[in-house]
Image (tube, grey):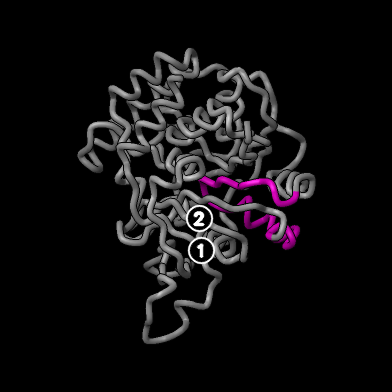
Amino acid sequence: MTTTPIIFDTDPGVDDAQAIALILADPAIEVVGMTTTYGNVPVETATSNALLLTELAGQTVPVAQGAARPLSKTPNPFPTFVHGVNGLGDIDLPSPKTQAVDQTAAQFLVEKTKERPGELTLVAVGPLGNLATALQIDPNIVDRVKQVVIMGGSVKQGGNVTPVAEANIYSDPHAAQRVFNAGWPVVMVGLDVTHKTHLSPDRMARIQAAQGELGRVLGESYGFYADFYRKALGIDGCCPHDSCAVAWLKKPELFKTVRGHLNVVTEGLAQGQTVFAPEEATFAEPRWSQTPLIDVCMDIDGDAVSQWIEDTLTT
C-alpha cells in the first residue's frame, strides 16, 4: 500500500482530536510525528492531549512541543467556551504515560524534512507559529516539503472570531503571512468549506462505538463542542474543521479549489483576515497579486466528506 507521510501540527482541541483519530486510523497515512502549539489551549495542554490521544489509539508517534504564544501580537484568551478548559470538553481524562521528545516543534520539522526531502506533507490545523519558526531556522525547508495543507482562513464566509478573521489565522497573523507566502506548495482549507461540513450525532455515536476508549473521548468531548455549534450556527452537530484538512489530503476530488494570491492582514481592525485574489482576476492595482500562488478550497461535498470520516473511523 502506498502511504502518505505527514507531520500533523495541532492544538487539540475537540476537532483536532477527531482529526488525530482519523490520521491514526487510516492505514494509507503515515504519521511521522505531531507538533503542538498553543491555540485552543495552552501548548502544555495541547501536548498532553496529543500524547494521550495517540496512546488511546494504541500507537506510538513522536510528539514535539512548540509555540507557546504568537510571534508578535498579544495572545488571545483561550476559547474555553468552545473546547473547554482542557481542550476536550472538560471530560475526565487520564494523564498520558509518554512524554514529548526533547526537541522543539520547529527543530523537529527541520530535522524530519532533512531526513526525508520531498516526501513529507505538513498538515497544520492550529496557529502557524511552528511552521513560521521552522522557516526562520532554515529557509531551505521550503524546498524539502512536498506540500503544506492548512486548516484556516476564510474568503467568502467571513470570520468565526471576528467579522472577518478565522481563529487560527487571527491567533497569529504574522506567522500566517510568513507561512502562506514562503513559496512552498500550499492548500488552504478554510471556513468556506468547513462550515459546509457537519458531523451529526448519529455519525458520532457510531464512531464512538467503534473506537474503544478513544471513542469515549471523541464522543464525550463532541457533546460539549456540539452545544457550542447549536448556539453559534444553529446546526445539530459540529463542524469537523480539522478533519476537512485531512479529507482534502485523501479525497481532493470532493473539493473545488481556486488558485490565486493570498495576503493576511496583520494589523488593525481587520487583523487576521485572509484576502484572496484569484489568479485570473484583474484588480485596480497589482498589490493584491504579488504573493506566491496557492490553492484555496472554495467548495466541498460536505455530506461525502462526513461519510468518509465515519467510514474511516468505523472500519
The residue tagged with tag 2: helix, strand or loop? strand
Residue 135: within the magenta? yes
Residue 78: within the magenta? no
Q: Which residue is mark 1?
A: 294
Q: Which residue is mark 2?
A: 187
Label 1 crowd bin: few (<14), some (14–19), many (20+), radius 10 Å: many
Give the answer, above or below, for where 160 lies relative to 164.
Answer: above
Q: Residue at x 63, y 35 (%)?
A: 2
The residue tagged with tag 1: helix, strand or loop? strand
Q: Position of residue 247 (x, y in %)?
A: 45, 40
- Residue farthest to the bottom? 284
Q: Quadrant of residue 179?
A: bottom right
Q: Position of residue 291 (x, y in %)?
A: 53, 73
Q: Residue at x 36, y 56 (%)?
A: 298
Left/right of residue 289 with respect to residue 24 in the rendered view:
left
Q: Quadrant of residue 302?
A: top left
Q: Nearer the viewer, residue 306 or 221?
A: 306
Q: Residue at x 79, y 45 (%)?
A: 115
Highlighted magenta segment, given as a residue range: 117-142
Label 2 crowd bin: few (<14), some (14–19), many (20+), radius 10 Å: many
Give the answer, above or below, for where 72 lies relative to 215.
Answer: below
Q: Is the residue under label 2 in contact with that under label 1 (CB below 8 Å)?
A: yes
Task: Indicate the amino acid at tag 1.
Answer: Ile
Q: Residue at x 45, y 47 (%)?
A: 252
The N terminus: image quadrant = top right
Task: Indicate the amino acid at tag 2.
Answer: Val
Left/right of residue 290 with respect to residue 218 in the rendered view:
right
- Residue farthest to the front? 1
Q: Position of residue 225 (x, y in %)?
A: 34, 32
Give the answer, above or below, for where 178 lies relative to 98.
Answer: below
Q: Earlier in the sequence, mark 1 or mark 2?
A: 2
